[in-house]
Image (cartoon, rainbow, N blue to C red):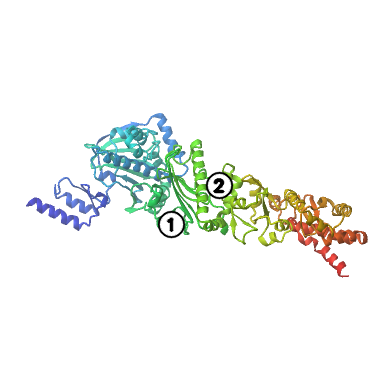
Amino acid sequence: MRQISLRSTCTRLISAAAPTVSPSRARFTTVRLSSPAAASRIARSGSLVGAMRFYSAEATPAEKEPVVGPGEKHEFKAETKKLLHIVAHSLYSQREVFVRELISNASDALEKLRQLQTTSADVSTDRPLEIGISFDSDKKTITFEDSGIGMNAEELKENLGTIARSGSKAFIEKMQANADTKDTASSIVGQFGVGFYSAFMIGDKITVYTRSAKPGSEGYCWESDGLGSYTLSKADNVPVGTKIVISVKDDAKEFLNQDKLSEIIKKYSNFVGFPISVGGEKVNTVEALWTKSKSAITEEEHKNFYRFVSHSWDDPMYHLVYQADGPLSIRSILYAPSKNPEAMGFERIKPGVNLYSRKVLIMPNAESLLPDWLRFVKGVVDSEDLPLNLSRELLQNGPVIMRLKSIMTSRIIKWLQDESRTDPEKYAKFFKEFGVYVKEGVCQDMSNQKDIAKLLRFETSNKEAKQLVSLDEYVEAMPESQEHIYYFCTPNRKVGVDSPYYEPFKKHNIEVLFLHHTLDEFVMGRLSEYSGKRLVSVDSEDAGKALKKLSDANQEESAESAKAALTKEQSAELTAWMRDSMGLQVSEVRVSERYMTYPAIVVDFESPAVRRMMKMMAGDGNEPMPLSPCTVEINPRDPVIIGLFGLKSKNEELARKVAMQLLDNALIAAGILDNPQSMLKRLNEILAATVN
């Protein structure tokens, strides 16, 4: 009866003291009370509750898990001291990664324990597998605690007493000796054994409390200031797992903040496979979708995950779940957005794919993972085959990285090709937003150029405005006699349709691609051919030669046209006179062999796109670029040309003005006259002479 009464008294005391018992501690014999007075009252009650221990909320880790007996002092080896200094001061580019490293170590410990539990190994713990982080701003400490496999004295000496001695690496090697456990071994994160010491970047002392999950194991306290030695002592009341207490330096107080710690966890360790809490609040609430099968992911999950990784609020237009085990282990989930930020006036976007290894962030916005033209793709690529350096931050360039880049690039191109075939209208909307990136790819990514070219879409003379066709569709519709793929770079469709360069192709019913983007001319120049067909601009000399063949094949048309044309002698006389009158701007004047209803055109000229680029490089956008000499082709059947032949004998001054006006008109049609206002005075003089 006395025992029952005492237990009842104990219960009332606990209730009166308003105890705070952490759910994760509910299985322990340790009870945390909210005040020192409550702990004192219960302690005076004697052995009221068997082996239960009570401590106040203000108790330090040393009070909760007191050191028992004398501690053993151990010196780090000389080379270890040097490495420790490097780890703490030079190895990592950002101090915040200590959070990632300690969480990765905790995840390893939990994974080891889970594996031992599933293989029926004898372990003495029933704690939930989780990671808890807390901080005390007054005492300037941050505590990382896991309920993993823990360590005994020898493992502490081996794993923490020697830098670059990784317990995880040894565990993987042991597990891989057993064929049945290779997959589990691959989920262990630690590889180098240096991550633990990253805590010295923000702490001047680290204290570790740990107890191995092996039955009968004792608790230990490991402590070091990172200057050359550590102390190892037995400790009482240590639960299975590991607790790391960091005494924070004065210049690292920014990390004594729940929001800051939560932000770092979400950045680097959000997808670790165990619950992570900061101050009792779970932080990693987003699931690592790339580890799930494609069929197991809902559209809603895709939408939410896309918004998480892209930091945007639109919905993805496309999504891809790609997983492979050979030649590299790859788990990935990728998204094509519905809007292009660069098109909305924002600055050049960073690469959108984050690189992970075993669900731990290695490189956000990984530049080396995909070619630059795929920077619009968002998502995650996770590979356990990554060759990392010791800090787990930077990739070591080599064949593995190049192979991963090649695999992912090819897979993304195939993905977009599949989407274009599945729903051409939807792909047309995608290309309207992101076609500029595809065009960049054609110009930059020579190893994948032919496959990227399949993703190009253009307007065509045979379709209504805004309707796009692929190069494959163009080639498929070509008549057998057509040798080339014809295109025309023009500001808009109307200008192209009304151009003298398109006119003969329209007459012969030859389909022409209309290209309106600044990059299009460079794209065609870099591509040069497609499916065995040369890409030929309608304003080029090659196009003129092709048109001559068509004209020669239609002798009746030529004979009819010749009735109202200058003779060969007259044409030769006029072209020689025009060449002298036009000066250095013209290298040659000749009779055109292509069909046209315009007086004259220019050929063999610098492309407008090249001229714009040269103008930008010159740095003076207001000054017109000097024209390189070009070739003028005249139409001997045009009334203006016929009239000019007679005018040069009657009024040579006016004839010269007309000739120069014809040249400017042709330059405007070609899109290479930088300053059209310069011709206004001459044009008014011609008009005045005409009306008078």
How far across and how far down the image is residue 108, in percent?
A: 34, 41
How far across and how far down the image is residue 133, in percent?
A: 34, 48
Hey, which residue is sitting farthest left in the picture? 1
Marks 2/1 in contact by CB < 8 Å: the verdict is no
* Residue identifier under label 2: 372
Is 208 above or below relative to 287? above
Viewer-nearest residue: 132 or 571: 571
Measure the C-alpha gap from mark 2 to mark 1.
Answer: 25 Å
Hey, which residue is sitting farthest top in the picture? 78
How far across and how far down the image is residue 514, in percent?
A: 65, 56
Task: Please count the marks in the image.
Answer: 2
Viewer-nearest residue: 60 or 127: 127
Hey, which residue is sitting farthest bottom in the picture? 692
Left or right of residue 12: residue 605: right
Viewer-nearest residue: 275 or 561: 561
Q: What number is the disc on residue 303? A: 1
Q: Is mark 2 on a helix, strand or loop?
A: helix
Q: Is mark 1 on a helix, strand or loop?
A: helix
Q: Which of marks 2 and 1 is nearer the N terminus?
A: 1
Left or right of residue 158: residue 218: left
How far across and how far down the image is residue 16, in percent?
A: 19, 58
Q: What number is the disc on residue 569? A: none
Q: Can residue 209 be seen by looking at this rendering?
A: no
Q: Can residue 524 be seen by looking at this rendering?
A: yes
Is 125 above or below relative to 75? below
**Quadrant in the rendering for residue 490:** bottom right
Q: The disc labelled 2 sits on which kind of residue?
A: Asp
Q: The disc labelled 1 sits on which kind of residue?
A: Lys
Q: How crowded is mark 2: few (under 14 residues within 10 Å), some or many (20 or more)?
A: some
Instruction: Specify the quadrant that holds the C terminus.
Output: bottom right
**Quadrant in the rendering for residue 506:** bottom right
